[in-house]
Structures are given as structure tokens and as C-alpha cells.
Image (cartoon, rainbow, N blue to C red):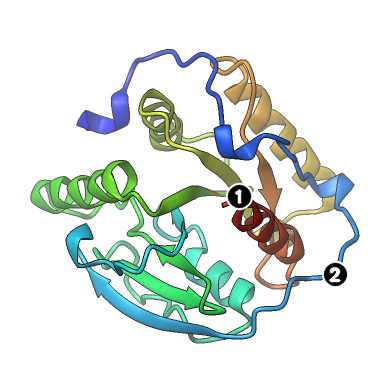
């Protein structure tokens, strides 16, 4: 993987399963009823995709930098406060966690990347785990990449997007912690982020804006997953 493919300028990607390319932004949230999550349970943790569930159900994986709010987002989506446990030490977990939703699909919690205090060997192990799952896990239907909306585009995230593009991985961008900003600053930050991506992309993948505190974006994300599942 070599640093997520640094230095390659990415041009058009075709998100085959995302044909209608819905883009949700803070100032244009669609009113809809939230799809019901009837059940959500932990199934397995491991570092080897060969040990992941083999029942063929679609998998939606969530990934992002350490401390981006991934566990809180997963708990918000499933409406369970302690389904995904937040680690007291960011970057500690190096596991692939599978949660079965409504006995129909898996929500997959991938290890966070970008933790500065990891050793070189730990970072190499992390890249191996992530690349194996993202590139070789046939059941992975879509990857949600989480971005903290408070920050400017980070080099490691941009490099990760490039790597995904080079390998034709279907993904969406999920901005987290929207409640930490005023509406005006939030809108400005997201517009600036998208403008930065468009310097290297001719079109963007779907974008979602979320808050684990007030459930912003929950209905949109769950409906999006339901819509994709309906096409499978």
C-alpha cells in the first residue's frame, strides 16, 4: 500500500453502486423517517479477513483517523450507547469489529489510522489489516470514510482518498462532530473541503454531515444503506 499511494493525481472514478450520487450537506438535509434498527449485536473481532463472517451478508465499513468519533457514530446509528466501546487510548485498537444489523447486514468498525504514537511495526500491521479488508473482502459493499469537520484537509486523509481511488474502492465521506461548529462555519468548512478535493477529482463521492450528539445525519445514512441493500 505504501503510504496510501502518495503523489498520484486521481481523475474520474465511477462509483457503480452509487448511481444516483446523492449528496447530503448541512444546509440541505432531506426530511425523511429514520429507518428502524430493530437489532444490533456484536459478532466477532479479529485481524484476519479469513475469520470474518462467511454468510455473504453485505458489509458497510467505517474508517477514519483516530479520535474522529467513529465509536460514537456507530452507537448513534444503532441507537445503542455502548455497542462500540470508545477506547481511553486513541489508536490502541487494531481489530476488525463486525456488528450484525437487523440480521440483514454488517456494520464493520475498522481500526483508526493516523495515530502518531504507534510504532513503525504497529503502523505496518495496521496498513496490512486495512488493505487486506478493503481490497480483498468481497462482502464489503461500501466504505464510509469519517472526517472531523472542524479541521482543514489532512495530508493522511487526502492520501487515503487517493489510494481508494487508485484501487477503485467505492466510498462515501462522512463529516463528524457537526454540533461543535455553528451552521455558518460548518457550511464553510465543508465547502472548503470539497473544493480542495475537486482540485484532484472531477466529481465527488456522496457526502454526509453527522453529529453523534444530536443524531444529525442518522436518517440519511441508514436510508442510504437501505437503498443500496435494495439493489443487491
Q: Is residue 106 visible?
A: yes
Q: Along the line of sight, which residue is nearer the eye, 119 or 205?
A: 205
Determine whether the residue tagged by mark 2 lies in a helix, strand or loop.
loop
Task: Point out the tag, 1 or 2, that comes first from the N-terminus.
Answer: 2
Quarter holding residue 224 = bottom right
Quarter holding residue 173 = top right
Q: Is residue 64 visible?
A: no
On the picture, is 170 further left or further right than 220?
left
Give the residue displayed 46% in from the left and 84% down from the top. Answer: 41
Q: Along the line of sight, which residue is nearer the eye, 21 or 112?
A: 21
- Nearest to the eye among marks 1 and 2: give it: 2
Quarter holding residue 4 = top left
Q: Along the line of sight, which residue is nearer the eye, 228 or 123?
A: 228
Q: Position of residue 107 (x, y in %)?
A: 47, 66
Give the residue displayed 31% in from the left and 22% down from the top. Answer: 6
In the displayed structure, would residue 165 be above or below residue 63?
above
- Report the number of numbered marks: 2
In the displayed structure, would residue 163 be above or below residue 208?
above
Which residue of the protein is positioned furthest toward the right in this rendering?
31
Q: Which mark is residue 174?
A: 1
Q: Quadrant of the N terminus?
A: top left
Give the residue displayed 34% in from the left and 16% down from the top. Answer: 7
- Residue pointed to by mark 2: 33
Q: Position of residue 214 (x, y in %)?
A: 75, 72
Within-10-Å neighbours for mark 1: few <14, some 14–19, many 20+: many
Determine whether the residue tagged by mark 1 lies in a helix, strand or loop.
strand
Q: Position of residue 90 (x, y in %)?
A: 35, 65
Q: Which mark is residue 38?
A: none
Q: Are marks 1 and 2 in contact (CB under 8 Å)?
A: no
On the picture, is 72 further left or further right than 42?
right
Amino acid at each position: 500500500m505504501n503510504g496510501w499511494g502518495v503523489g498520484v493525481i486521481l481523475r474520474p472514478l465511477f462509483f457503480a453502486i452509487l448511481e444516483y450520487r446523492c449528496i447530503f450537506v448541512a444546509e440541505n438535509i432531506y426530511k425523511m423517517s429514520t429507518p428502524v434498527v430493530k437489532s444490533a449485536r456484536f459478532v466477532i473481532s479479529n485481524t484476519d479477513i479469513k475469520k470474518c463472517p462467511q454468510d455473504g451478508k453485505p458489509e458497510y465499513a467505517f474508517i477514519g483517523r483516530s479520535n474522529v468519533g467513529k465509536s460514537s457514530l456507530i452507537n448513534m446509528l444503532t441507537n445503542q450507547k455502548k455497542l462500540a466501546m470508545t477506547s481511553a487510548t486513541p489508536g490502541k485498537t487494531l481489530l476488525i469489529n463486525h456488528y450484525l444489523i437487523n440480521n440483514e447486514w454488517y456494520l464493520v468498525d475498522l481500526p483508526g489510522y493516523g495515530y502518531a504514537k504507534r510504532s513503525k511495526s504497529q503502523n505496518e500491521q495496521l496498513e496490512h489489516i486495512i488493505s487486506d479488508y478493503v481490497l480483498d473482502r468481497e462482502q464489503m459493499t461500501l466504505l464510509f470514510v469519517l472526517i472531523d469537520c472542524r479541521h482543514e484537509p489532512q495530508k493522511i486523509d487526502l492520501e487515503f482518498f487517493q489510494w481508494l481511488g487508485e484501487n477503485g474502492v467505492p466510498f462515501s465521506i462522512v463529516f463528524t462532530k457537526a454540533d461543535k461548529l455553528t451552521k455558518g462555519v460548518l457550511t464553510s468548512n465543508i465547502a472548503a473541503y470539497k473544493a480542495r478535493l475537486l482540485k484532484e477529482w472531477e466529481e465527488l463521492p456522496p457526502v454526509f454531515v453527522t453529529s453523534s450528539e444530536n443524531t444529525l445525519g442518522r436518517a440519511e445514512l441508514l436510508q442510504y444503506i437501505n437503498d443500496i441493500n435494495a439493489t443487491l
